[in-house]
Amino acid sequence: MPQSTATAGWRNWAGNQSARPGRVVSPAGVEELGEVVRLAAEQGRTVKAVGSGHSFTAIASPGDGVLVRPDALTAVRGIDPQAGTVTVESGLPLHRLNRLLEAAGLSLTNMGDIEVQTVAGATSTGTHGTGRDSGSLAAQIKALEIVLADGSVQQCSPTENPELFQGARLGLGALGVVSALTLGVEPAFLLTAHEQPMAFDEVMERFDDLTAVNEHFEFYWFPHTDRCSTKRNNRSQGPAAPLPRFKAWLDDDFLSNTVWEGACRVGRSFPAAIPTIAQLASRAWSERTFTDTAYKVFTSPRKVRFIEMEYAVPREAAVEVLRDLKALVEHSDWRISFPVEVRVAPADDLWLSTANGRDTVYIAVHLFRGSSERGYFTAVEELMTAHRGRPHWGKLHTRDAEYLASVYPHFGDFTALRDKVDPGRLFGNDYLRRVLGA
């Protein structure tokens, strides 16, 4: 049997979700994982696998059931450069995967902006970056292995258990415990990053062009200002020209984390100072260009703790929604210290993907941990849902199954599959009851 603990508590990265599970286990392999699931079912306990805890919702909360830590499920089962695939176990952190692929001369096609999550945690919640042509991490899955409620280990792909594959690629942890994933990869490539300050109105006027001509475009708008920081990442033939080590540390670690956290703490204690801090912060982001290995450009350290809400809206509604969001902030008494992050993604076919069936723009709003402007999230959510927005599964929202069924064409397909593979809700929790129904 795997090592177990009866008293250890669990808390997510942001500190806004916690639980005291009845049992904590760290199975050493898929056979032990299957045994854990079977035993939990016999005892009438629920089972939840927990990765790095980077979801802001309670999607992974084990309640008082069995918490599965995938710390020992980190093996690399195979790398096939010819087929363009890598098969890894579910608990492998993305930062380790990136370095293993780099050593093999390979790369993921697209990534989010951090690399601390486990591969299964990231894919199961819909983690994404920004991309004109390339989608989320889950969209890069070619096959997977999952332990179902009866303890059986199932392999699935487009040709083997295709219905289970369709649901489990982005399964919210609701169908079973993913134990291994096969991801599509490609030969390693360089990205040239061009980061440039730009006025909000200019970004809005050029948004169609900026998202069309760049492989990866995103921007941050600083509330209480008219300024944005834009980021354009495109493939490069080289040579590599990374930021000097000191410059990278100064910009991406010291200024973006240490100094930024200090500024946020000042703003939390003295909200009236936030507009001035925002003006200063928006001018601290200077123009720069560098070329480096793809994952080093996609990702950067994020050490300042915050809570986040992110909605996916139809691509054609993006500019209208962003202008309305700016007007909301300007006509309110809120004091918002964190910038608004905007990214894009192409339509995909994953049943519960926020980009399912439609080209998508992601709009993320944040609050420094301990801030009190919750009315901000409420108003933003009202704006997003007026445009049939879909909330990120791992980020704060108040939507329920009735609303989500109205914005996901395949919502019923997913819940029917769940009824088939987990009728007893062994993998359920309060969050899943809200978003998927009882």
Image (cartoon, helix red, strand yellow):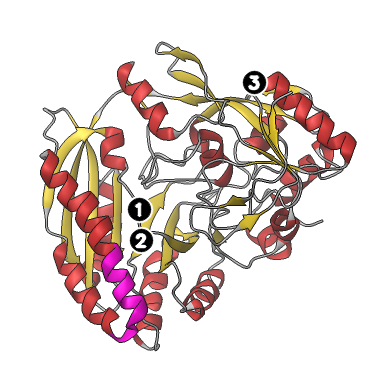
Residue type pointed to by label 1: Lys
Q: Position of residue 181 (x, y in %)?
A: 56, 26
Compared across the picture, whether 161 is left or right of 299 comes to right
Q: Which residue is mark 1?
A: 303
Q: Position of residue 321 (x, y in %)?
A: 42, 71
**The N terminus, quarter of image:** top right
Q: Which residue is mark 2?
A: 341
Q: Nearer the viewer, residue 100 or 182?
A: 100
Which circle's residue, 1 or 3, is located before the other in the chain?
Answer: 3
Which residue is drawn at the image coordinates 12% and 59% (left, top)?
Answer: 286
Label 1 and label 2: CA atoms lie apart by 17 Å
Which circle's residue, 1 or 2, is located before the other in the chain?
Answer: 1
Residue type pointed to by label 2: Glu
Residue type pointed to by label 3: Gly
Residue 160 appearing in the image: no
Label 1 and label 3: CA atoms lie apart by 31 Å
Task: Report which quarter residue 315 is drawn in.
Answer: bottom left
Q: Position of residue 219 (x, y in %)?
A: 29, 59
Q: Which residue is mark 3?
A: 29
Q: Position of residue 396 (x, y in %)?
A: 55, 63
Q: Secondary structure at mark 3?
A: loop
Magenta span: 261-272
Which residue is drawn at the image coordinates 31% and 22% (left, top)?
Answer: 102
Q: Secondary structure at mark 2?
A: strand
